[in-house]
Structure formats: C-alpha cells, structure tokens
Image (spheres, rainbow, N blue to C red):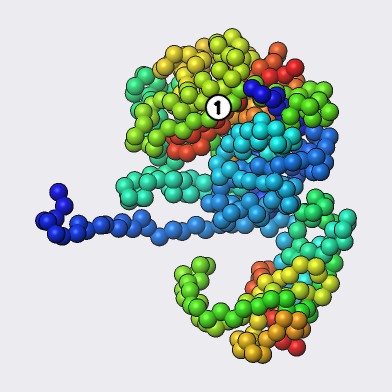
Amino acid sequence: MAGTAGETPELIKVHSGAVEVPYDWHCGPYWSRFFRGLRDEKKIYATKCPSCGRVYIPPREVCGPCFARMDEWVEVGPEGVIEMFTVVRLPYTNPSTGEPLSVPYTDVYVRLDGADTSLMHWLDETDEKKIAVGMRVRAVFRDKRTGTMHDIEHFKLI
Amino acid sequence: MTRRVAIVGYAQSNHQYDMPLPREDMVFEVVKGALEDAGITKKEVDTVVSASTDFLDGRTISGVFYGMAAGAYLKDESKAEEDGTLALYYAFMRILTDIYDVALVEAHTQGSCINPHQVSFYMLDPLFDRQFNVLNDIATAALQARMYMSKYDVAEEDIAMVAVKNLANAASNPHAHRRMLDVTPEEVLNSKLYYEPIRELTMSPISDGACALVLASEERAREFTDSPVWILGAGSCQDSYLRDRNLHRLESLEKAAQRAYEMAGIKDPVSELEVLEVSEKFAHEEMMIYEALGLCREGKGRVLIEDGITSKYGELPVNPSGGALGADPVCATGLIRVIEAAKQINGEANGYQMPHACRALAHGQFGLCAQKNVVFVLGGE
C-alpha cells in the first residue's frame, strides 16, 4: 500500500489529450447574404421584423419576441456609436489558433446607424481614456475580403 | 396517473446530409410546423423543452442560441443534453404537475457540422479508455455486436436482414435520409467495413434533422384536436458504463419498458401493441431491443427477423418508417420515433401506414452501446 508512515501518498494526474473539435457551420441564406454584402459590396445588411419593426444585426430568420420570419432587408452603418467596450489586458490563448493573443486590444459593441441590436468587433484604440460610450465609430473594411466577420478589419473612432 | 397528457401536433424536417441551413432555421421550421399542426400559436405554449448536445451544437449552453427559433423567448424553458425522448419525458412530467398545460418539445442535430462519431470519443472514461485513442461509439458497438453474436449464435447475415428491412422501409418515408427500396443482403454485407462487423449499411447514417411536437393536458388537448395521441406509459433508465455492464443485453431498456408497460397496463406487449418505432443506431441493436422490450426471449431476436414478424407485413411491425438506420439526426432520432408512432395511430403514415395501429411503442436511446433508454407507449382514442 501507500508509502511509509508519515509520508503523504502521491496523488496522480493523467492527461487525456488535446481536444480538437473542427466545426463547419452552415450559414444558410441569411448569414450568407450578410457575408456576401461584406465581401462584395462593403455593405452591412440587416433584417427587419415585419411585426415589430426591430432591425437585427447580424441578420437572422426569426424575431424571438414576435416568432415571425423576417424577410425585409435593410442596410445599416457603416457608422454607429459605441454601446459598450472593454480594453483587454490579460493575455490568453486564441482558441482558433492556439497562439497567445497579444494585448492590449479593445472589444467593442457598436450600435450601427439604423440597427436595433449591436455588433461585436475590435476598436483600433487601446487607451481607455480616449474611449467613451456614445462615441461615433466607422467600420474599416479590408482590401482583401473573403466573406467572414474579418472582412471588417476593425472600427475606428471618428 | 393523475392527469392524461396527449400529443396534439408535430413536424419533422426532411432529414439529409449537409442541410444548407443554420440550425436555428431548421429549428424554426419544425417548431412552426408543430404549432400549425396543433392549430395553436406560441402564446398557448407554457413551457419549452429541447434536446441537443453542446458538443454537437458547437457551443456551450447551446439552448440560448436556438431558443428564440424554438419559440422560447422569455418562456419557461430548459434543455435535455441528450435524446429528444428525454425532453419529452421532462415535458410530460411538467404537465403532470398541474402547473403547465401545454408544452413544446424540440430536438435536433446537424451531423454535417461536426462528425458525431468523433465527438463520441468524449463519452469515454478519460483515465482508461480514452488513453488508447482507438475507441468511439462505432468501435464500442462493434465490440457489443461481437459479444452478442457469439453469445447467441447470430450471423452477420441476420444483422444484414435488419438493415434490409429498415432501409427498404425508409424508401416509403419522404422524411428519411438513407432510402434503399431494393437493397439486398449481399449489398449490405458488401458495404464498406468500418469496425468489424459494423459496416456502412449496418449503422445509421450521419444526418441533419430536427423535429418538434406539442404536448397538452387532456382539457387543452380536447380544445385543440379531435385526435389526441395519449401518452399511456413512460419509462426511463440507464445502465452502468461500458465495462461494468453486460454489453450483450440492454438491461436499462428492459427496465424502462417494464415501467412504461406497467403505467400503460400492458401485460403482453406482443398482443397489445400494433406497431413499434425504435432507435437502432446499429442493425444488431434492433434484435437486442426486441429482447429487452419482451417481444421474444433473450437471444431470440434474430428469429423475429428471420420469420418476418417485424417486417411491414408481419404480425408486429417494427420501424415501418425506416428507424434510425433510415435517418439519424442524433438527438432528434428518438423524438422522431415518437412522432412516427403518433402518425401511425392517427393514420397519417402515408405509404407506410400499418393497419389497426391503436397502440404503439416509441423508443429513444443515448450513450455508448445504448447505455440510456427511454420508452413511451402511445394510444389513440
């Protein structure tokens, strides 16, 4: 049995391998149109509820409160206001690459002009003294766009 | 039972591989369909119970993402992290409490988003079984099949006959995914060998699919429909983990069925049931399911197949819809069985309607080698 009197028996830890879970997400007609808009037109499209008139960004099929299908498309942005933000200073692993994320960077939720919900993105300013809720920002599109959220590089203060 | 509870509406998707929709859209379509079928709106729904797994949905607490599409906005809501029959079980209990009258039950999986068999690795015990990196749900099913075959002298040909029956049945079901009207035992036995003796056609296909149903107390059910399908009995049970159980038997299914039979007042399932819809994720499991449900003695499941008793034209048809071999959108598969059983009772199974289907059994399972099982006995007026 365990070690001699007075010794604390060693408690063992076993590793069960690195988790790799690659997902392929179907974007369907709604998000596909949204991503095509970013990629091909540098435009941000949202859906509008036929019942309550709420404009959803990112667009989706169903308005939860009304349980109604949204078929109307509207263009929103590319400018908007900062609704909330945080400057990140704690380094952690980028779950998509396994590499450490370099800090600082700024997470921002932008309420785009014409939208009733907010879009998460990065802000190109990391000095919190220069950022405030309610400031106006504008989407900066990449030159090379592939049809993902990264087609917007970041938002900048205007 | 204190209160009677009925199924009053249902809908399912056309199950297929690579359905080009986000799961929210898939969920919305079936939930809308089930509400329409019941002739009610979201307003009438008191509680929503869904079933899926975070691993297969690709996000934790995944219910919060598809909840709006399931009609759960600011409603009483919860999620079963397993098969849809578990969600139905919880919804059934909620109505039995007298606190809720109308429940919406939804289940889905998008198998094309991530391979469910790859994820099944994480069902394994991490300290021992996971260390070998060789086991998953197919491998463990192969071990189970071998054990069952050697114990009861079952041949690969017997297993192939199950696949032939269900894949041909699926050809009549427009919602099924793998539909093979003229499939032969030779074709099954020559299909690609995955984990001996499991072959491509003796295991369920990877499907995308969703389904939903509306459940109501007797009083509300009578307002909504003239043809309620009553839940006469229900049972749920789980066995121990792989190595700790008798893999050649489905003891937890036996117990779940006994509870459901007792609640429904069924003494002899063979003479008192007209049709069964079961979740055979692997063809050999269907014979084990027969035994656990008391349709035959232990080890004699193959006789029911050989004699055609469970074929569409037999005395006790099992899986006229094609079962899980016909389509397996993992978490939806058991709830689809419930819907198919309800369709039989309502005479709505166009193209595969069984005669005189007054009482039916539906079965769902989850876990490695059907570790967990749920049974419902349904009946018409």
Q: Is residue B257 visible?
A: yes
User: Tag 1's secondary structure?
Assistant: strand
Residue at point 78%, 64% (across, down):
A56
Where residue B338 appears, as percent x and y from the top left, is 65, 29
Quadrant location, the N terminus of chain B: top right
Residue at point 36%, 55% (across, down):
A16
Q: Quadrant of residue B343?
A: top right
Instruction: Report the residue marked by disc 1.
Output: B235
In the shown orientation, is residue B354 left or right of residue B136?
Answer: right
Other residues around mark 1 within 10 Å, as few (<14) / some (14–19) / many (≥20)? many
Vertical placement of residue A41 versus B295, above or below: below
- Comparing B152 with B46, the one in front is B46
Where residue B128 appears, as percent x and y from the top left, is 31, 47
Q: Quadrant of residue A152?
A: bottom right
Where residue B312 appears, as percent x and y from the top left, is 63, 17
- Comparing B171 with A100, the one in front is A100
Residue at point 51%, 20% (across, down):
B258
Vertical placement of residue B73 versus A111, above or below: above
